[in-house]
Amino acid sequence: SQKIEQNSEALNIQEGKTATLTCNYTNYSPAYLQWYRQDPGRGPVFLLLIRENEKEKRKERLKVTFDTTLKQSLFHITASQPADSATYLCALGQRSGNTPLVFGKGTRLSVIA
Amino acid sequence: EPEVTQTPSHQVTQMGQEVILRCVPISNHLYFYWYRQILGQKVEFLVSFYNNEISEKSEIFDDQFSVERPDGSNFTLKIRSTKLEDSAMYFCASSERGTSTEAFFGQGTRLTVV
């Protein structure tokens, strides 16, 4: 069966450290992988998109990697801040534009000052 | 910055009643979606809409659900006869070119069925 696993339900780190979140999937062949941030009671907010032929993408303090052999994406937040505390969702997208994003359950990150 | 707007933000309804959730997607986007999120669970796909018709729907999107784009700007989700298990946050989203581009989500409608 198809699965998307974000293997930490919750992650606590000290301010200033790098947070690393993992997204593993099985029985999917995504063409795109996206990461979103979700705050309590709010809609997901897009952060980064990486394509299957890309290994790494960066945006300011954020970095995402995509390994289609391992079927895994890693999402890094460097120099983490308490304001980074939120739930982070990974989402897989197929090549066909009509096929919807499929979301993992998310990892709740808490950055402690 | 363009945004997806949803109304109402909260809706409480009696079981068996019909509800309509409304969304205004971003104007130049071509793909529209409804997702829902039951409290503490993951964001689940309901339906996608492209070129004025449903392009894909999940098992959740049964005969009780329908979507419309009545006037070229609004995008609505109707639940004909609500059940207790329909209680959730409902998110509308739009994107320019499907999953190869970012999806913009609205702030959601919290539906409570009593």
Image (spheres, rainbow, N blue to C red):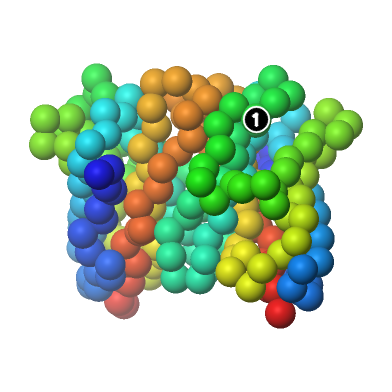
Counting from the top left corner in percent of width and height, residue A39 is at 50, 64
Task: Find the residue positioned furthest to the right.
Answer: B71
Q: What residue lies at 21% left-to-right and 59% top-to-bottom?
A: A7
Task: Find the residue positioned furthest to the front.
Answer: B63
Q: How crowded is mark 1: few (under 14 residues within 10 Å), some or many (20 or more)?
A: some
Q: In this view, does B107 lie to the left or right of A57?
A: right
Indicate the secondary structure of the residue bearing disc 1: strand
Residue B54 seen in the figure: yes
Counting from the top left corner in percent of width and height, residue B79 is at 73, 55
Q: What residue lies at 27% left-to-right and 24% top-to-bottom?
A: A52
Q: What residue lies at 49% left-to-right and 35% top-to-bottom?
A: A100
Disc 1: which chain? B
Whether residue A36 is situated above or below residue B2 in the rendered picture: below
Q: Is residue B31 left or right of residue A1?
A: right
Whether residue A33 is situated above or below residue B59 in the rendered picture: above
Circle 1 sits on which residue?
B54
Q: Give the image quarter of residue A106.
A: bottom left
Q: What residue lies at 56% left-to-right and 55% top-to-bottom?
A: B36
Q: How many marks?
A: 1
* Viewer-proximal residue among A113 and B108: B108
Q: In which quarter of the image is the C terminus of chain A?
A: bottom left
Q: Quadrant of the N terminus of chain A?
A: top left
Whether residue B79 is situated above or below residue A68 in the rendered picture: below
Q: Give the image quarter of residue B66.
A: top right
At label 1, which amino acid type do we have?
Answer: Ile
Counting from the top left corner in percent of width and height, residue B23 is at 75, 46
Residue B5 seen in the figure: no
* Viewer-proximal residue among B54 and A17: B54
